Amino acid sequence: MVRTYGHLIDGEQIAAASGKTFPVENPATLEVVAEAADGDANDVARAVEASQTAFDRYWRRTTGRERAALLTRFAEIIASRVDQLAQHETIITGRPIREMRAQVGRIPDWYAYYAGIAQTAQEVVAPFGPQYLNYVQRLPLGVVGLITPWNHPLLILTKKLAPALAAGNTVVVKPSEFAPTTAVELAQLALEAGFPPGVLNVVTGYGPSAGHALAAHPGVAKIDLTGGTPTGKAVASVVGGRLGKVTMELGGKAPVLIFADADLDQAVAGALFAAFIAAGQTCVQGARILVEKTVYDQVTDALVSRANAIRLGDPLDPATQMGPLVSQRQLARTEQYVQIGLAEGARLVAGGYRPKEPPLDRGYYYRPTIFTDVKPHMRIFREEIFGPVTCVVPFADEEEAIRLANDCEYGLGAAVWTQDVKRAHRVAQRLEAGVVWVNDHHRIDPSSPWGGWKASGIGRENGWDAYWDYTQTRSVIVNLDPTPFDWYAGSERYS
Ligand code: NAD
């Protein structure tokens, strides 16, 4: 029996105003596993109105301590449902249960962290001068819109939602059309935790309809979007056109720099983790593995033999190491880029095909794929593929490694593998990226600022930055001077 999910507006699951739904598919089996409400501008208007009412009636008057108590309760409830939520995300995204359990298991940390900030954030007194008391209030923005992708559906939603709620905003979420249902489940859990109806609303639907309507709505003070760079540019223009605020977490093409002095077994393991977790569908995917010439053959051979051994299978099986891609669109895109790489003259040394054995032949599976003989001008080196495809490229020295790493329009994540502590910091400080790992990859924490340079985005998730970005200031300037003041004193003489 296929369950139908409504929007969650003002505490109720409701059908789309149009009555339409769209199917949610299991990418491993191509079965329809749910139907979701197909939202449009009417549904968005209704959700924004509910959100504004909740903001005006009570949410804007809550104290940080009250919001912290709700966020703490929310974290506890999510922690008690990790298995169900992880299983649900596995079914709709195709990501192995092993990955989703690890990822969803971290989500309560974000609500707990921002509960801490909500009750400890202090306002400042500006040093205006002795005649004035200038206190600076931090106030919520009002109704904010969160537009999220399908690759880490609940985690990315959480990175935005936790600071937005902690700062006292009410929220309308538009999750990806490929993975919309866990956002509705999460909003149900928020009601269970005691968040008043209307504080967290979800409108499901497609980007150009529901997403665009949310971005264009004049009642939405900020749009926080994670998605592709073309989507980010289009949405930021719409929001900018009405002077709304934006945070944009966009695409990437992360370099992984492996120096000859690295622990090479760990570096190979780290590069595979970087390249193939989530079947390569992550914004910080290790898409360009740069290897010092003297160990290039050794590292490439190890990468190829280990990539060929990665176990594809049923995503619900804990032994599965890689599931299918999320959709026909991602599979077609991956296949197209493999053809582009071959046409450009790169050498395919692993993967490059769909597994043919049943039952994998039914889903959107694709073998982990590695190219060598890749030149920096090639499209497979420069463009985001968002699939299980990586390039291995040699470099002669540190200068060349840094030049290759930075020769890219994106600047989200990067990794450096070396045992030389001086080199690690020297290289990290020259990489054009918002996040640099040393001897690691993919690690995140609610306290650690996350976001991109260059075409990878505007603004930051996590940490205090994200919290402040969900507030606006009011500077209250109090005159303490007992001396009377009259700028135009004496002007009566001329009248
Ligand atoms: P996408 O750009 O196709 O969609 C993202 C969201 O935007 C979806 O909810 C979609 O419905 C919505 N959308 C699309 N067009 C819209 C429009 N015109 N107006 C309003 N909303 C619209 O991205 P995706 O395929 O879901 O996710 C993959 C992309 O996300 C990759 O480029 C990846 O690098 C990026 N990403 C970035 C980060 C990060 O932290 N920077 C994290 C994960 C994914």
Image (tube, helix red, strand yellow):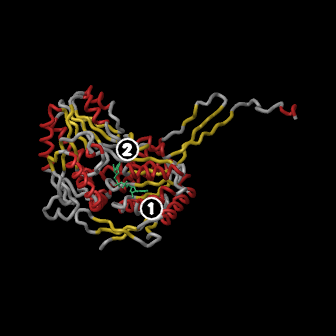
Q: Using the rendered view, name the quadrant where residue 411 is placed.
A: top left
Q: Residues within 10 Å of mark 2 (few under 14, many from 20)?
A: many
Q: Amino acid type of disc 2?
A: Ser
User: Which numbered disc covers residue 483?
Assistant: none
Where residue 336 appears, as percent x and y from the top left, is: 25, 54
Q: Earlier in the sequence, mark 1 or mark 2?
A: 1
Q: How many marks?
A: 2
User: Which numbered disc covers residue 456?
Assistant: 2
Residue at figure coordinates x 37%, y 58% from the top left: 176
Residue at figure coordinates x 14%, y 64% from the top left: 358
Residue at figure coordinates x 50%, y 48% from the top left: 245
Is the residue indicated by label 1 positioned so its CB lies within 8 Å of ligand 1? yes
Kind of element beneath mark 2:
loop
Is the residue indicated by label 2 positioned so its CB lies within 8 Å of ligand 1? yes
* Residue 77 seen in this snapshot: yes
Where residue 409 appears, as percent x and y from the top left, is: 35, 41
Q: Nearer the viewer, residue 154 or 295?
A: 295
Kind of element beneath mark 1:
helix
Please state, as top left, top right, bottom left or bottom right, where the N terminus lies in the image: bottom left
Please state, as top left, top right, bottom left or bottom right, where the C terminus lies in the image: top right
* Residue 449 seen in this snapshot: no
Is label 1 in contact with label 2 (beta carbons under 8 Å)?
no
